[in-house]
Amino acid sequence: VGTGAPLAERARAAIPGGVNSGQRSVPGITDLVVARAEGARFFDTEGRAYTDYHAAFGPQLLGHNDPDVSAAVAAVIREVDLCGVGVTPGEIELAERLIELVPSFEQVLLTSTGSEATFHALRLSRAVTGRRLVVKFQGCYHGWHDAVSLNVISAEDALNRPDPISAGILPEVLESTVVLPFNDAEAVRRLFADHGDQIAGVIVEPVPHNIGCVLPTDEFLITLREQTTQHGAILIFDEVITGFRHALGGWQEISGITPDLTTLGKAFANGFPLGAIGGRADLMQQFSSRPGGSAFFAGTYNGAPVVVAAALATLTKLTEQPVHEHTFRLGELARAGLREVFAELDLPAVVTGYGSIFVSYFMPGPAPRTYSDLLANRADLFVGYRRKLIERGIFELPLNLKRSHISYAHTESDIEQLIDGTRD
Ligand code: PMP
């Protein structure tokens, strides 16, 4: 890393921190200036190739610059850029296809990002219940806005953060957020027994991927559904990562648990800026039926034709080609191969993940079930291992606890390169 030095200097002068993405806290990565990306790889300004398992935090399930997605975008841009009035046939088709694919969807609205979708879901939960408290889980990330206060461990943690920006988070919002340990069904039951009449909603990444990949127990998800139903609170599945990647219908299809609201993002437009909120029609209708209703759900770029075209092309490919079969098979190969290498090297590593996602934690097993389990992860080994991979032209983000992604463009020989790069 560090090949684009003069450009990186210009970036630091013009852009605070030198990057626009969430990688601003990763030393060295801010010196990486990307010129081009295609398929499983991106290239820096000096032409160096990196096999990409970061996938811009996940969206490129088909790989970079998928030819079918790019062709669909090029075609639509000749017809309409952005009107901001009425609706386009593409938006209607996309909404209908999402309703077909996601088990809990009766109606859906588009946003530009996942953060907007979670914001709307939380505000709607408070509006329809007339209650204030929102429950989230340790290590789960739901966006950058105050309403869920990043991936905090607790409200105190957020309030006491030393960085200047966290000081700008509204204390009222933090005080209205209860943070519980993930996979702790008993803690959920206790909270509802004591405060059930004050809880507006529960938001959860059904599989927390912002701390690698932590699989839920059946009991945990069933308890969330039972308790929210019993106490009249809204259950929100944040499927911004799990949606489309783990199954076309997301984790709700796999688990059989039906949330009231679901937020989507990332993979369904393969890198174009798109999010969505959908779910029960009686809840979604609140966005239209109140006086001046549409003002409660706004966004200049919602339903932008270019993004909608990208999503339709992505969904067509996801439904018509063996994307899941291919990426899941490579995921298995990666996990098995990495387990073998770490055993050979006598490194205490837990290789886990699901489908096309993999992550190696440097700690004794078994695979983590809670955020606290991850305190045993050796961040120095984790980051050091990934920096070594980058030197070998294999890009996994060198940031503690970050998951890695396989796309439809990766091949078996890419996985061999990953395993060999780990062994050397
Ligand atoms: N929810 C989850 C589970 C996410 O991982 C993210 C982004 N990493 C978001 C919401 C926010 O999405 P966006 O970055 O598109 O605002």
Image: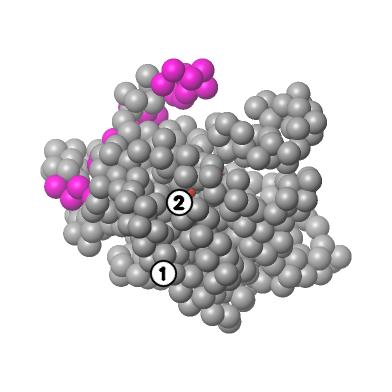
Compared to residue 263, the image places residue 410 above or below, namely below
Residue pointed to by mark 2: 403
Q: Looking at numbered disc 2 in the image, what kind of residue is underneath it? A: Arg
Q: Amino acid at mark 1?
A: Glu
Indicate left or right for 163 with 60 as reference.
Answer: left
Q: Which residue is mark 1?
A: 332
Quadrant where the image shows the N terminus: top right
Q: Label 1 neighbourhood size at 10 Å, few (<14), some (14-19), many (20+)?
A: some
Between 101 and 129, which is closer to the camera in this rendering? 101
| Magenta span | 161-186
Mark 2: few/some/many CA within 10 Å (<14, 14-19, 20+): many
* Sequence-first disc among 1 and 2: 1
Q: Position of residue 30 (x, y in %)?
A: 65, 34
Q: Find out whether residue 402 is within the magenta segment.
A: no
Q: Secondary structure at mark 2?
A: loop
- In the rendered image of this protein, does residue 131 appear above or below residue 396? above
- Secondary structure found at label 1: helix
| The quadrant where residue 401 appears | top left
